[in-house]
């Protein structure tokens, strides 16, 4: 593994609007140090240790947090700290978001997430929340208290806009377990230019095979793709993109769609926004599964999901991976610079020692980017206890320095007493003009020492020796079977991006499991159209993940027989190994390589079974039936076939027509009716089905009683991408033509005579008028209805001269029979 170096001195942000700031710091080391981004921070942080001038603050913070908790009502215990203060004080922002009476530092203001607050038409403040209900309780109990936007009846949760003056009433319901702010997810993007199509070698596969993902469906889940039409107009997306649901956003979804289109230009593209809550995200995945997507790719991280076990989203994604015939790909995250994990160590005052002598960990906050008034900062603390059953009570504090003293900015002080989630969360807005410095502190109020895990995101990153880039992958990207994608630089595709989240991913419930994540690396710094003011280039694991989706769509489409698990296995085994030999927690298995993956799967094509369905059938002479030409599976997402179908006995029947399923794009056949037809077609067949997949349908007419085989000539063939030809094992069908039913002859008055009879049992129906007597009336009736006999009666029953056709010779023969 390559050395990662010492303390980081520059940060990578997670939203494109902040990229300019990050790039300036990266390119100007002097500016970074001038802004106070120090190489070493232990000395400064040690001011907070016991016995320092700031110790009074640590005592008061912890004590006031205890006092705050002891004054909570049962309903308030169900609310996070920030919502308790909103309900009590009716304030939207500012000091009300801390348990302390003193105002926070001027440059920082505690705040609810921007996407989780709004005003009603009458000006009343409302918040966007998850309402978690007791098992068996329908979500309609929430309806009287707010506007429900999403529901999950199976998991007893709703997302709703609730007026703050009704929030306490809602929390008072016995049916409500807890209420949480809807925290917007992180999207793992950024912006600088190269072509993953070349580096990951999907272009080489297209050159060798002529195939670019045709017939494969790739679904993207991100924030938005609302400017996709601009990308279509510029030629960066096909006009066939299907947008299932969208919102106004930063168009990261459009950027991801473009990356897939670059690497798999023939694939069908789908998009569903996953914002702004976890229920919408799950709905997005379900919709893409319903659309038949072969590959689903997302770049969304939910930091309020459990870190030490599989939560709501991860459990759902696990079900999809286990039960659906698809490959799920997810950005591993851009959190290597914003992660800390370690066991709680008491400093003697109930605070956690991040490093020897320091109960603080330092972080840097980017200033607002151009066009923005503030920079949002979010911090999440979790500890290793069961989700929903936490009994150890931790608090999270955010402080900064003002001159020689530390000042509390905000805290999160929820109660954990056995039926709560082990999480604290702080959200603030930063107003400074230069990078700001903040410190985090964690206090254990009651309970047992646990392993702690902290993420700082949006506009912040850790600048401290105590930070731990390893182990920063959690949630649904950490699910076994999900392809978690890290990012290597396009300008040096052997070098990991410094922000790319590292593994492994460790869960402790239901049992300890260390999961080898990330799985693979894609390439970021990819050229895109830049619609929606997103920027013309794109970096982050958000760019790398759709590039790998394009690799999978291309190679799997050529080898559709391979199972999803088989696809993942070959993807990993053929990757360009980077870092330590084999899998490692930085690069995973290495950089994806489409050409090596294709070569590994390019075994001699297996045989295909071609059968005629129904395999055995009966039809009356003069009537028609349909016969499907069916292959037992679809070995590739794009197929070309040339089949010569024929009837073994032309006297028994004829092929009168050929029809094709909707997936066939180009088709032709020789002229009909005939006993033989040559069929040529190309198309994108569906996935293999239990009963096989029909290539076309023959219409066959029975002409005369008898039996004929329907089969395919030896020159018939099916061809996949790259001229891969499949050997056909043909199973012929059998058609038995039955005599047509005897019909009564028509009377001149519009009625009918009685059914004709066969008086002597020789198979000829001489008694034409059905009166059981042979007379000249039978001859006259026969002679006057030759066309009716030809069209409506079985030939063999009225071919009296046995020459295989109906005519005046049969009239003369019948006359002779009557005369006898």
Image: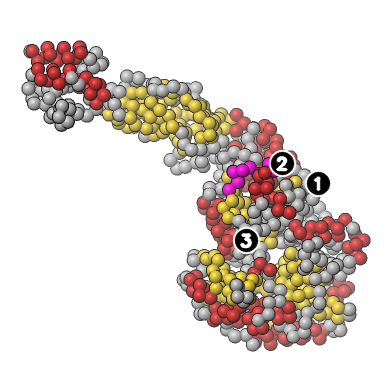
- Label 1, label 3: how far apart the Cα atoms are: 33 Å
Q: Does the magenta stretch include residue 345?
A: no
Residue 311 lies, with reference to residue 290, above or below; the image says: below
Regarding residue 10, the answer to whether it shows in the image is yes
Which sits earlier in the primary sequence, circle 1 or circle 3? 3
Helix, strand or loop under label 1: loop
Which sits earlier in the primary sequence, circle 2 or circle 1? 2
Residue 424 at what x, y percent from top left? 68, 74
Colour option used: secondary structure
The residue sitting at 74% across, 84% down in the picture is 100
Regarding residue 586, the answer to whether it shows in the image is no
Q: Give the range drawn in magenta.
A: 234-242
**Left or right placement of residue 178 versus residue 614 in this view:** right
Mark 3 neighbour class, 10 Å CA radius: few under 14, some 14 to 19, many 20 or more:
many
Which sits earlier in the primary sequence, circle 3 or circle 2? 2
Helix, strand or loop under label 3: loop
The residue sitting at 86% across, 81% down in the picture is 405
- Closer to the camera in the image, 383 or 781: 781
Helix, strand or loop under label 2: helix
- Closer to the camera in the image, 805 or 568: 805
């Amino acid at each position: 593994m390559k050395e990662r170096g010492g303390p980081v001195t520059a940060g990578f942000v997670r939203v494109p609007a902040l990229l300019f700031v990050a790039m300036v710091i990266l390119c100007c080391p002097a500016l970074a140090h001038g802004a106070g981004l120090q190489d070493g921070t232990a000395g400064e942080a040690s001011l907070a240790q016991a016995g320092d001038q700031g110790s009074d603050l640590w005592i008061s913070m912890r004590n006031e947090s205890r006092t705050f908790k002891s004054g909570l009502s049962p309903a308030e215990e169900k609310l996070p700290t920030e919502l308790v203060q909103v309900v009590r004080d009716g304030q939207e922002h500012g000091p009300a978001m801390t348990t302390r009476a003193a105002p926070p530092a001027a440059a920082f203001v505690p705040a609810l997430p921007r996407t989780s607050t709004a005003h009603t038409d009458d000006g009343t403040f409302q918040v966007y929340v998850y309402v978690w209900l007791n098992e068996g309780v329908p979500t309609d109990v929430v309806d009287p208290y707010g506007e429900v936007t999403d529901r999950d009846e199976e998991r007893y949760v709703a997302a709703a806009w609730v007026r703050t003056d009704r929030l306490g009433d809602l929390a008072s319901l016995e049916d409500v377990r807890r209420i949480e702010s809807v925290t917007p997810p992180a999207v793992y993007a950024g912006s600088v230019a190269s072509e993953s199509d070349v580096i990951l070698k999907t272009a080489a596969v297209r050159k060798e095979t002529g195939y670019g993902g045709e017939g494969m469906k790739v679904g993207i889940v991100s924030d938005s793709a609302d400017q996709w039409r601009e990308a279509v107009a510029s030629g960066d997306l096909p006009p066939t993109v299907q947008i299932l649901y969208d919102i106004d956003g930063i168009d990261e979804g459009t950027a991801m769609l473009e990356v897939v289109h670059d690497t798999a230009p023939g694939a069908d593209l789908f998009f569903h926004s996953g914002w702004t809550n976890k229920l919408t995200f799950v709905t997005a995945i379900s919709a893409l599964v319903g659309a038949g997507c072969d590959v689903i790719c997302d770049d969304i991280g939910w930091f309020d999901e459990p870190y030490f076990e599989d939560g709501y989203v991860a459990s759902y994604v696990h079900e999809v991976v286990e039960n659906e015939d698809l490959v799920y790909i997810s950005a591993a995250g851009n959190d290597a610079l914003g992660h800390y994990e370690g066991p709680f160590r008491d400093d003697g005052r109930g605070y956690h020692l991040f490093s020897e002598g320091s109960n603080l960990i330092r972080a840097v906050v980017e200033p607002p980017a151009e066009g923005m008034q503030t920079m949002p900062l979010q911090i999440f603390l979790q500890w290793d206890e069961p989700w929903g059953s936490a009994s150890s009570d931790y608090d999270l504090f955010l402080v900064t320095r003002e001159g020689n003293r530390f000042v509390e900015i905000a805290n999160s002080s929820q109660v954990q007493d056995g039926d709560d989630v082990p999480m604290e969360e702080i959200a603030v807005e930063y107003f400074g003009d230069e990078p700001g410095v903040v410190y985090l502190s964690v206090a254990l109020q009651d309970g047992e020492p646990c392993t702690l895990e902290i993420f700082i995101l949006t506009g912040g990153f850790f600048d401290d020796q105590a930070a731990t880039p390893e182990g920063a992958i959690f949630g649904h990207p950490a699910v076994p079977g999900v392809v978690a994608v890290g990012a290597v630089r396009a300008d040096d595709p052997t070098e990991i991006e410094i922000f790319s989240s590292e593994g492994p991913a460790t869960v402790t419930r239901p049992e300890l499991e260390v999961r080898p994540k990330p799985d693979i690396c894609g390439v970021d710094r990819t050229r895109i159209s830049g619609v929606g003011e997103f920027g013309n280039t794109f970096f982050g694991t958000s760019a790398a993940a759709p590039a790998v989706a394009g690799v999978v769509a291309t190679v799997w489409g050529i080898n559709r027989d391979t199972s999803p698990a088989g696809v993942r296995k070959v993807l990993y085994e053929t990757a360009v190994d980077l870092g330590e030999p084999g899998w490692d927690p930085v690069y995973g298995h290495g950089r994806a390589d489409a050409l090596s993956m294709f070569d590994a799967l390019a075994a001699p094509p297996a045989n295909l079974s071609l059968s005629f369905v129904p395999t055995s059938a009966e039809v009356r002479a003069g009537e028609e039936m349909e016969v499907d030409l069916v292959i037992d599976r679809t070995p590739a997402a794009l197929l070309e076939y040339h089949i010569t179908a024929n009837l073994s006995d032309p006297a028994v029947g004829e092929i009168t027509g050929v029809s094709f399923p909707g997936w066939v794009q180009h088709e032709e056949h020789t002229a009909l009716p005939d006993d033989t037809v040559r069929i040529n077609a190309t198309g994108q067949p569906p996935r293999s089905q239990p009963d096989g997949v029909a290539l076309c349908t023959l219409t066959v007419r029975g002409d005369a009683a008898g039996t004929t085989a329907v089969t395919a000539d030896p020159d018939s063939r099916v061809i996949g991408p790259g001229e891969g030809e499949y050997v056909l094992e043909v199973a012929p069908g059998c058609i038995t033509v039955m005599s047509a039913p005897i019909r009564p002859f028509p009377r001149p008055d519009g009625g009918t005579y009685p059914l004709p009879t066969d008086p002597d049992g020789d198979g000829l129906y001489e008694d034409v008028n059905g009166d059981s007597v042979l007379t000249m009336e039978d001859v006259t009736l026969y002679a006057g209805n030759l066309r009716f006999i030809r069209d409506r009666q079985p030939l063999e029953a009225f071919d009296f001269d046995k020459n295989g056709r109906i005519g005046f010779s049969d009239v003369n023969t019948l006359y002779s029979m009557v005369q006898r």
